[in-house]
Image (tube, rainbow, N blue to C red):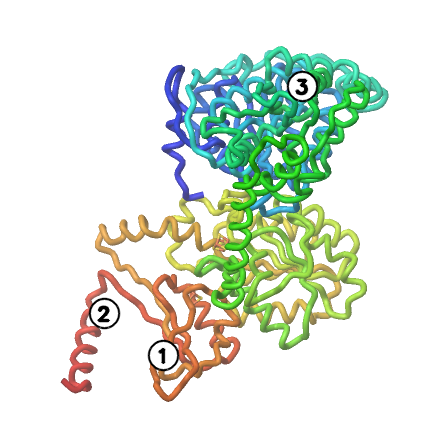
Amino acid sequence: MEISFDKEIQQLRLGAGDEFHGEGILAVTKALLQAGVAYIGGYQGAPVSHLLDVMVQARDLVAELGVHVEACSNEASAAAMLGASIHYPLRGAVTWKSIVGTNVAADALANLASPGVTGGVLMIIGEDYGEGASVVQERTHAYAMKSGLALFDPRPELQAMTDLVEHAFALSEASNMPAMMELRIRACHLRGSFICKDNRSPAISSLSPLERPAGFDYARLAHPPSTFRHEKLKQEQRLPAARRYIVEHALNEMRAGRHADVGIVVQGGLTHALLRALQAFGLADAYGNCELPMLVLNVTYPLVPEQIAAFAEGKRALLVVEEGSPEYIEQEIASLLQRNEVRTALHGKDCLPATGELTPEALMQGLLPFFERHLPVADTRAVRALLDATASRRRELAAMLDTALPARPPGFCIGCPERPVFSALKQVQQDVGPVHVAADIGCHSFATFEPFSMGHSILGYGMSLASRAGVSPVMKQRVVSIMGDGGFWHNGLLTGVQSALFNGDDAVLLIFKNGYTSATGTQDILSTPGRAAKAGASDPTQSLTSTDRRIEDTLAAIGVQWLRTVSSYRVSEMRKVLRDALTTEFAGLKVIVADGECQLERQRRLPSWIAGLLARGERVVRVKYGVDDDVCNGDHACIRLSGCPTLTLKDNPDPLKADPVATVIDGCVGCGLCGENAHAATLCPSFYRAELVRNPRWHERIVDAWRRIARRALQPA
Ligand code: SF4
Ligand code: SF4
């Protein structure tokens, strides 16, 4: 990747007493080094990508400490890496996006949690839930309960978060339970400060390796009959040990309040949103002081029954503030109170929304019925007025959006190599009829929006080819499966390609080879071109395959017989190859590799590359496309085949024509799609290609001088 994390890496070097300023996820990264972690791995994904991105670039620092960093091929390999801590007193940390990443990691996690760990294990989980989320809306909490993993949900304040990282390792060692820390989007990206400690070199590391492996111990294998004992250990030893640690180190915060006969139990990560909502009722202030007793659960699994019962003691009513469904915490508290014969009224999802992020506004709405029933002294009039005003403003805005403003769905970057391929796929369906498109996770999923609207299903990262296995046999027309190179290496090669070959399936797979896992932040993958190869990438249509054929070679090696590589920007050629794949008599797996580097990455390194050429006095050409107003017939077919943000509309300069004409605005990166589409779809000939040449050669200067003379002669003064 071309992004530099130099400034962030400097923060990781801070020592005892220094003050760290920055993002939550970077603070957690620093806390891992302070905790003496021996190895770090993971698979990138919002909102925790920066953890791994920074560590991968911090090679010098991690080498000094002896910490091993592994960019894993998927979340399953990251979770399996934690197996190092089963036998050895090594602290290990991994990271990924949840819930999807935890789903991928689930098998390894269950097999890790069964024998338990010796060295502390911590998974930093990006809980991608609520406004701004990009995955299915489920809760990681279910995995903690089912496999026996401690689940931290820290109050989003940097000192608390970093302290809890150290406690998570210590709790994991005290209980042998692997620990997870769920960080919501806002916790990852909030900015703040904390006082640092020195980084710690692990006792066992690449700098001081072990002399010999641990002795054979069948009890540490997740194999029967050991697994029967593991199940008992979880209940009889590990959970009690974890609960003891939570109480002895006051990980959950029991806060007193003036209204002592009601209380709120809140997930740590929601504390500040709750305080903001309580502020609207006049029950809290901007410094976090609150008039209601609160039990802040910085550890949401396991709960401590005695702690819950003690908090409920003497209270008429409790409200459990828990995000998402099912309400695992509320249900557990209900049964704890019942078992302990505590007669406190319990509320939660009967007041609060069952789905969606618990923003301060959602919390205000949920607190209203609770207070009206159990805290009548609370003044609810101001909150009702505020909520009514917000609802009315929202209705006004919705009406304006319906009528006055066009929708702005997300889309491909300007010049993205994936856009031309969908243009070709749109055009080929005019030849062969509509096809079922099995879509996937990645930038190519932007094709599910206008102007392409393609993709019948998305079953998970790298799953497109596997997801069409039940569709293909019942479809007259062949199904097209879309996959990025990130998804291919993540698991598409095994779940899709291997299965299709083994079963002799008649399938079409279109792989976008753009060189990176672009959608998660353009991280490098196995087939990313090397730095030397990228340095020469002046032409946007330059082939990645010329420098790396690992995808093609892998496919050929495992038996793919029908394999074509086509430049992403060659629309006519791509249209022809797609038609061939959809109509050929060859009945096996047909793979088309669409070859074109991620334009975002390319544009990041272009300025310094161009500056270097100019400094050396070398020739630099910038290509731009444009539309001739006089020729554009105003049917906008080019826009319907492209969707490029820089190909747009402007008023028709001809006063006799009402329809707006197409125009290319500043920002066009000259990818060539406009010209390719005009040619492949036989559109009107209104597009022109212009070259802006800096440091032209001598013969170009002469030609330019002659052209100027000719123009002056032909144009009236
Ligand atoms: S990040 Fe790269 S692959 Fe993704 S939309 Fe932008 S240019 Fe295309
Ligand atoms: S050539 Fe066309 S599609 Fe490519 S960046 Fe320019 S306007 Fe967009």
Structural crowding at the residue carrying mark 3, measured as other residues with C-alpha within 10 Å and reported as few (<14), some (14–19) or many (≥20): many
Q: Residue furthest left?
A: 717
Q: Which residue is mark 1?
A: 628
Image quarter hosting the N terminus: top left
Structural crowding at the residue carrying mark 1, measured as other residues with C-alpha within 10 Å and reported as few (<14), some (14–19) or many (≥20): some
Q: In the rendering, which numbered label is found on residue 263?
A: none
At x 52%, y 41%, the residue is 382
Does 326 sit above or below residue 398?
Answer: above
Considering only order in the chain, which callout, 2 or 1, is on the residue closer to the N terminus? 1
Q: Which residue is mark 3?
A: 311
Residue 397 point in image, percent of width and height: 50, 59
Considering only order in the chain, which callout, 3 or 1, is on the residue closer to the N terminus? 3
Residue 416 point in image, percent of width and height: 47, 59
44, 676: nearer the viewer: 44
Considering only order in the chain, which callout, 2 or 3, is on the residue closer to the N terminus? 3
Instruction: Check whether the beta carbons of the residues at disc 3 and disc 2 lie within 8 A of each other.
Output: no
Q: Which residue is mark 2?
A: 700
Residue 40 point in image, percent of width and height: 55, 27
Q: Residue furthest bottom?
A: 656
At x 49%, y 46%, the residue is 522
525, 113: nearer the viewer: 113
Q: CA distance from mark 1 to mark 2?
A: 25 Å
Q: Work out whether residue 246 can be spotted.
A: yes
Q: Is residue 345 left or right of residue 556?
A: right
- Please name the amino acid that badge 2 sits on: Glu
Mark in the foreground, 1 or 2: 1
Q: CA distance from mark 3 to mark 2?
A: 83 Å
Mark in the foreground, 1 or 3: 3
For the residue labelled by badge 2, is the local secondary structure a helix, a strand or a loop? Answer: helix
Instruction: Check whether the beta carbons of the residues at disc 1 and disc 3 lie within 8 A of each other.
Output: no
Image quarter hosting the C terminus: bottom left
- Please name the amino acid that badge 3 sits on: Phe
